[in-house]
Amino acid sequence: MLSDAHFTYPAARRQDITEERFGHSIADPYRWLERPDSEETRAWLDQQDRIRHAAIDALPGRDRLSSHVKELISVGAVGPPVWRGTRYFFMNREPGQEHAALFIAEEDGSRRLLLDPMKLDPTGHTTLDSWYPDHTGTRLTYQVSVNGDNSSLHVLDIASGAVVDGPITRCRNSPIAWLPGSDAFYYVRSLPGSAVPEGEEHYHRRVYMHRVGTDADTDDVLVFGAERSKTTSYGLALAVDGRRLILTARTGATHHNEVWLADLTTDGSPQPVFTAVQSKAHAHTRPLVGRDGQLYLHTDHDAPHGRLAVTDIENPQPENWRDLLPQDPDAKLEHVALLESPELTRPLLLAGRNRHTFSEIAVHDLATGEHLHDIDLPGAGVVGEIRGRGHEAWITYTDPFTPPTVLHWDARTRTRTVWASPPGRQSLPEQPPGAVHHLNCTASDGTQIPVTVFAPHSRRGPLPTILYGYGGFGLSLAPAYNPEILAWVEAGGIYAVAHVRGGDEGGTQWHAAGAGANKQTSIDDFHATAEGLIQGGWTTSSQLVISGESNGGLLVGAALTQRPGLYRAVLCGAPVLDMVRYERFGLGPSWTAEYGSADVEQELEWLMSYSPYHRVTPEGVYPSVLFSVSDGDAMVDPMHARKMCAALQHAARRRPIPDDKAGVVILRREPGAGHGARSMSLIVGLLADQLAFAAWQTGLPLDSSA
């Protein structure tokens, strides 16, 4: 066991900074930790690194756990095809590879490598963020990021493999709409830093048209966005007929969006005239144009669980929409795909729905919406994507014990086959190590909160448990394959996922019930799921670890300050924790629709009521916490974790530590990664540290695990 000396935390200077806002005196003793490059911060971080390594590197069973997590991740990955004529593009990661690579398959069945991030950068710090082939499969745009940031766009000639354009900077995760002829495309780019206030370099996006081979800085044509909010983001697509540009716009983290259409054939101008389809409704709508020339709209307008409407593309305003698939009150419409082919007796519509966290796919008549039959899925899992082409569809499927697999469905014969599975799938055990249980825990207002529980087959009595939550931005937690869950369950623990309000499991109303003024509801739901697991005999407070990332980091950060005695330990990844100053860092200004703004009196009241950093008191006794951050995170600034870590360590230093592991506070940081995509080695290292920490805190014996 580790000695108390390992947890002699570094002295962190407490500043006497108090900010007056709307009658609140808001203390901020660790504001100096917002500056990552100051000498004082670097010295503090160096000491945190030493504590982290002393506490975690030699934990019992950590190395064995790391090897097993690597095995589970090393099954590889494969993505669905993107067809262009008779050839298609797909992603593939072989067992042991750090990143997935992009391949092209020709009509004769031959395949060749197009892009491998490890060939671009052998250090593994470069990620392939996105790629878009043109309509003929002649050229392809791709975007890469280095160390989680510094994104750039390039154009590849597919036949020769030569880069014919780029790098074009400031276009992170830009959508691409190729024009017919493959000589130009529409894309999204931020204004240069010299043209915007300091700290706003990731905002002020605009839609441009770029001609391949020209200077993006001087020759690109501004198309849309000049008068928009700095936090507006855009989606772009070209209709199948190549005639119309589809544009969607969303401000910040608002759920609703705007939809615009432009006819590119009217006058030949690179600056088309846009017609509003949806501009003021508080709804989210995804448009697509069928080969029949109709405009189909997957929308939650007047339908919290989603519906599919259709209208004449010449008269696309909402008053002209008619329902093709009305809302199902018990299931959320998540995916829509059109199958239009002369080989079919009639055009078909595939509708993917989420019913009580599990996916289902129904086949409908495209003209009438009549339900014809269903497509059977391999089990109780989730569909990530449906891509239709002619009479065929490719479906990505996963469940808790099945890595993402691509299914193929032929509408002519109604047959489903496995198109591709991860290359190392056969290395996984045939029988899953545990079972999936579906519970409902009662929230304080009587609402039933769904909880998905993964438990070993041989469970006897309460066990060490990780409870994971997110609860924000209208995102659902799907029962997908997760090496973290598998490794924990195989070691003998329970892993539970709380589907709290603020997510989208129950549609837009479920999201609204846990956002803005209602954010505390998400936290209360999380407490209720923890209490439900304890009362149900699954675990105990001394065996319960809570876990969350990003907005989920906020969730568990608030939980540990409000009910510290309910939890043994906390895994807090890339968290948002200072709710008074979050708008000043990273992509914080984009989130005011989700959280509220500290510049608005009423909304500051919401934020102050649960802001984790401001609820830490020197006299408080808190669970053990492992903060995990990445130095290159441009979305959620690591300053949140630094300041919260200092506050919790200050509280821990003011009281005796009862044993050598209770109430410890550790900051784990890593270079070479951002908020999302990273190499397999970095993923393995992070998961091993988090699970080993959880096992150490709860007494789960990793050395004896299989």
Image: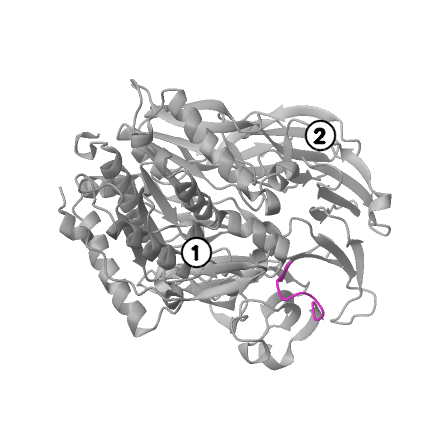
Dot 1 falls on a residue whose secondary structure is loop
Question: Count the marks: how many?
Answer: 2
The amino acid on which the numbered mark 1 sits, given as a three-letter code, is His
Quarter of the image with the N terminus is: top left
Dot 1 or dot 2, earlier in sequence? 2
- Residue on which the image places disc 2: 364
Left/right placement of residue 704 relative to residue 337 reads: left
**Other-residue count near label 2 (Cα within 10 Å), few / some / many at <14 / 14–19 / ≥20:** many
Left/right placement of residue 454 relative to residue 492 reads: right
Separation of marks 1 and 2 at Cα, in angstroms:
39 Å
Vertical position of residue 41 compared to residue 695: above or below: below
Residue 479 at what x, y percent from top left? 47, 33
Q: Is 229 inside the magenta-drawn segment?
A: yes
- Residue on which the image places disc 1: 675
Q: Is 534 inside the magenta-drawn segment?
A: no
Q: Residue at x 64, y 80 (%)?
A: 219
Residue 126 at what x, y percent from top left? 39, 62
Residue placed most toward the observer, 564 or 672: 564
Residue 148 at what x, y percent from top left? 42, 62
Dot 2 falls on a residue whose secondary structure is strand
Vertical position of residue 487 compared to residue 582: above or below: above
Residue 430 at what x, y percent from top left? 33, 25
**Residue 629 occupies which quadrant of the picture?**
bottom left
Residue placed most toward the observer, 106 or 422: 422
Q: Residue at x 69, y 73 (%)?
A: 222
- Closer to the observer: label 1 or label 2? 1
Q: Residue at x 52, y 41 (%)?
A: 471
Q: Are marks 1 and 2 in contact (CB under 8 Å)?
A: no
The segment highlighted magenta reads 225-234
